[in-house]
Image (cartoon, coloured by chain):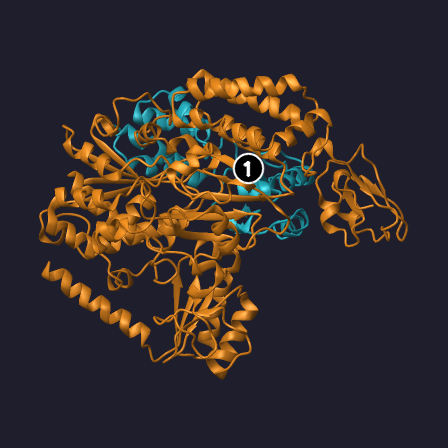
């Protein structure tokens, strides 16, 4: 323990030295979102510029701070000034910032906000946290994301890291479970089972060795909360695993993570190595006699492996197929031994609960759903990104106050991924917690919130999800394997305008068969997207079936592309991009579009600068 | 050929059959795909039948069984990408380079795959080319981008 206080003291000194640095410090947002927006190029360019100009400045990588639509983030902290955050910084803007702001001293480019300790306005610049997207958030799990260098363990320690672990050693395993019980924490993977109960079961189960598995197989399309957390603050997950392992009484930990997240895997590996070097992972951790090792297992791309028993089969090197329960993994899991599986966000919350106390955590949220929840706010919403709000926040607050609303009028919001449902406008005032969402026919899920506007076809969305689940169905049980396939067939008929009213009845019948007859959660929840869209957006189904029309002009077979002769100037841009040569015509004369050759790829629609091409259902003539 | 696979296999004990997936992943990383010969050698080493290995490998979408092209294109078809038009991009690309997901062009320039989600949903639709993610794609932008890859 004494050893740790020495490490802690050194870490705090390093962090303070960084904050009070006499040289400028540059922070580049290098999460996956930032990299996809070009942060890698910015990073290389900044390093070159600094070297070329012989500048004395530090450059640090940080994780994702949340508003992905403003990436790449580029923060500059000059001596004596708070860290100023600039958004959408590409290579040329970064050069300009360095030459004007760092070398010159002044810049006309306005920072988005400052990240100083004090949230008051600073010389006309508001606090970063006062922006509309961040103002109403409560960042507990994400408190370090975008703030610290995820590869530097001292940053994590200086900001209260491993205090939760120390407290756990103080109060003992039973004390930890009691603290989690007080906090009211429920599983953040979607089902919402009380975490303390899960731990208690595994602790009491007979058999050894026991295993702890972190489920980082974030398979829901449209969700990336876990990725951002692991990329931005891997230590909080690892500390959570240490605490969980100590409470359950196991020395073996696994992280089952998607291979699609190479950056998160790399950062976790670095973090594990750094913890090992400080004696925080391995044998006799902090001289308490507690041993713990973590292995990383890369998934190989199967959605069903998010299910506990399928995940275990995959770690054992088999096809990832679920089996019936009981026995539950807490009794017989990996290699037939007691196994506890928790989601990334659940484990990432644990250190915060231990550090601040279970009572403090239970102060957030609603009566039955305590604490905060992270969401990936995406789709047709103005401000997309990663957010964290207290449970019980309404969908309206999330979509309109935090997300800034939609461009076209709002139509629906989809929660819970392929297992969830689409909720219509009347549910906007629904508080987001486990029970309310389930009552409305959807689920909390892992936390993807996909916003849809009038340009989204709900039948197409239902088809998309069913297509996904039918492809990802492992094929073990018949209702799921054949039922989802049949549902896709019917939905396909509807979107092609070939369906009759009878098909909708068959579809409704199939939903209950698949729901009741499937073995695992994948099949049991697969009909949810169909059920909710049928319930709340039946008029769209009817338009497809009775009028053979797609109101949102999305379904390929029900729309037609044509050139509006009056608007076409004959500029030939569409002719050059059409992959099938469907558009012809001499320069300066209205072009011809041959519907026989047209594959409806939308290339002409995108490139036309004169609005001369339109989907038939959205006639602009 | 033999040496690379040998080096991978040597890192694992034949008894630990749970390492089959990591071995397949390493082989694919080095060779680009899982060839019948690789399966043979893995089968001999771990004493697992070839059909069992194919059973496991074909279950997971990560593994491919034909040689990859010089550049690999992965079109994200996650929910956010779908809502923002990812499907249109896939269809247009298929028409442009003339192959379907899972295939490689005859000149070995491109191979094409679809992925369920790359986790960059806030920047949808996204396309991944050779492990680099390109955000806010459109049919036109992708066409221009492809010219950079020979």
Tag 1 residue: B113
Q: Position of residue A358 (x, y in %)?
A: 22, 49
- Using the rendered view, name the quadrant where residue A541 is placed: top right
In depth, the one of B35 and A144 nearer the eye is A144
Give the side of residue A510 with respect to residue A500, left or right.
left
Query: Which chain is in cyan here?
Result: B
For image coordinates 62% across by 40% down, the residue present is: A456
Indicate the quadrant containing the N terminus of chain A: top left, top right, bottom left or bottom right.
bottom left
Give the side of residue A141 with respect to residue A457, left or right.
left
Query: Which chain is in orange here?
Result: A
- Using the rendered view, name the quadrant where residue A294 is placed: top left
For image coordinates 50% across by 71% down, the residue present is: A111
For image coordinates 28% across by 74% down, the residue present is: A17
Residue A413 appearing in the image: no
Residue A598 appearing in the image: yes
Q: Secondary structure at mark 1?
A: strand
Count of number-bearing discs: 1
Eyeballing the image, is A619 above or below A315? below
Indicate the quadrant containing the C terminus of chain A: top left, top right, bottom left or bottom right.
top right
Q: Position of residue B148 (x, y in %)?
A: 62, 53
In depth, the one of A255 and A186 nearer the eye is A186
Give the side of residue A396 with respect to residue A495, left or right.
left
Mark 1 surroundings within 10 Å by alpha-carbon count, few (fewer than 14), some (14 through 19), many (20 or more): many
Give the side of residue A114 with respect to residue A493, left or right.
left
In depth, the one of A322 and A381 nearer the eye is A381
């Amino acid at each position: 323990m004494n050893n740790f206080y020495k490490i802690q003291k050194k870490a705090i000194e390093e962090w303070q030295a960084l904050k009070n640095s006499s040289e400028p410090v540059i922070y580049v947002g290098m999460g996956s979102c930032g990299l996809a927006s070009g942060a890698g190029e910015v990073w290389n360019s900044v390093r070159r510029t600094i070297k070329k100009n012989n500048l004395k400045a530090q450059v640090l990588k940080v994780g994702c701070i949340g508003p992905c639509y403003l990436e790449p983030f580029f923060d500059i902290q000059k001596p004596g000034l708070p860290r100023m955050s600039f958004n959408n910084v590409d290579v040329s803007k970064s050069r300009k910032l360095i030459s004007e702001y760092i070398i010159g001293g002044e810049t006309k480019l306005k920072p988005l906000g400052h990240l100083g300790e004090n949230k008051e306005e600073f010389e006309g610049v508001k606090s970063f946290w006062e922006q509309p997207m961040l103002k109403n958030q409560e960042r507990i799990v994400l408190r370090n994301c975008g703030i610290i260098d995820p590869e530097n363990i001292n940053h994590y320690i200086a900001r209260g890291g491993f205090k939760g672990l120390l407290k756990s050693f103080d109060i003992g395993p039973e004390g930890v479970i009691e603290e989690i019980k007080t906090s009211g924490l429920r599983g953040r993977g979607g089902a919402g089972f009380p975490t303390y109960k899960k731990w208690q079961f595994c602790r009491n189960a007979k058999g050894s060795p026991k295993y702890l598995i972190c489920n980082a197989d974030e398979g829901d399309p449209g969700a990336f909360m876990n990725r951002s957390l692991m990329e931005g603050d891997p230590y909080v997950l690892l500390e959570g695993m240490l605490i969980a392992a100590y409470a359950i009484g196991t020395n073996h930990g696994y992280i089952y993570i998607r291979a699609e997240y190479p950056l998160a895997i790399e950062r976790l590996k670095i973090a594990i190595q750094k913890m090992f070097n400080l004696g925080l992972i391995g044998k006799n951790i902090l001289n308490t006699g507690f041993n713990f090792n973590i292995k990383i297992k890369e998934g190989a791309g199967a959605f069903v492996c998010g299910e506990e028993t399928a995940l275990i089969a995959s770690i054992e090197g088999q096809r990832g197929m679920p089996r019936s329960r009981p026995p539950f993994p807490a009794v017989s899991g990996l290699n037939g031994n007691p196994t506890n599986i928790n989601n990334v966000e659940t484990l990432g919350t644990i250190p915060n609960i231990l550090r601040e106390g279970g009572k403090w955590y239970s102060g957030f949220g609603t009566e039955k759903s305590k604490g905060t929840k992270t969401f990936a706010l995406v789709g047709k919403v103005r401000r997309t990104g990663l957010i964290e709000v207290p449970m019980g926040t309404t969908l309206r607050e999330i979509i309109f106050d935090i997300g800034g609303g939609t461009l076209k009028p709002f139509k629906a919001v989809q929660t819970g991924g392929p297992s969830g449902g689409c909720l219509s406008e009347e549910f906007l005032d629904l508080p987001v917690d486990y029970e309310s969402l389930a009552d409305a026919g959807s689920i909390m899920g892992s936390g993807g919130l996909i916003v849809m506007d009038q340009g989204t076809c709900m039948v197409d969305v239902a088809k998309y999800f069913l297509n996904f689940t039918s492809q990802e169905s492992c094929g073990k049980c018949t209702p799921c394997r054949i039922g989802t396939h049949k549902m896709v067939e019917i939905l396909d008929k509807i979107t092609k305008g070939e369906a009759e009213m009878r098909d909708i009845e068959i579809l409704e019948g199939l939903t209950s068969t698949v729901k009741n007859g499937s073995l695992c959660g994948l099949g049991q929840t697969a009909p949810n997207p169909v059920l909710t869209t049928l319930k709340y957006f039946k008029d769209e189904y009817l338009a497809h079936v009775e009028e053979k029309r797609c109101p949102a002009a999305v379904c390929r077979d029900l729309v037609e592309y044509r050139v509006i002769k009056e608007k076409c100037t004959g500029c030939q841009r569409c002719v050059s991009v059409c992959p099938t040569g469907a558009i012809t015509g001499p320069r300066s004369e209205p072009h011809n579009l041959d519907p026989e050759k047209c594959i409806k790829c939308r290339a002409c629609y995108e490139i036309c600068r004169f609005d001369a091409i339109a989907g038939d259902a959205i006639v602009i003539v | 050929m033999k040496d690379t696979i040998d080096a991978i296999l040597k890192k694992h004990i034949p008894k630990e059959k749970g390492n089959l997936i990591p071995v397949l992943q390493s082989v694919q990383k080095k060779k680009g795909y899982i060839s019948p010969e690789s399966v043979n050698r893995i089968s001999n080493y771990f004493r697992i039948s070839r059909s069992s290995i194919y059973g496991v490998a074909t279950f997971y979408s990560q593994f491919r069984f034909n040689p990859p092209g010089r550049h690999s294109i992965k079109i994200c078809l996650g929910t956010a990408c779908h809502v923002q038009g990812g499907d249109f991009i896939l269809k247009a690309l298929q028409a442009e380079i003339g192959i379907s997901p899972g295939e490689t062009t005859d000149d070995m320039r491109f191979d094409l795959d679809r992925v369920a989600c790359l986790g960059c949903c806030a920047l949808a639709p996204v396309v991944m080319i050779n492990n680099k993610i390109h955000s806010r794609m459109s049919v036109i932008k992708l066409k221009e981008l492809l010219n950079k890859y020979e």
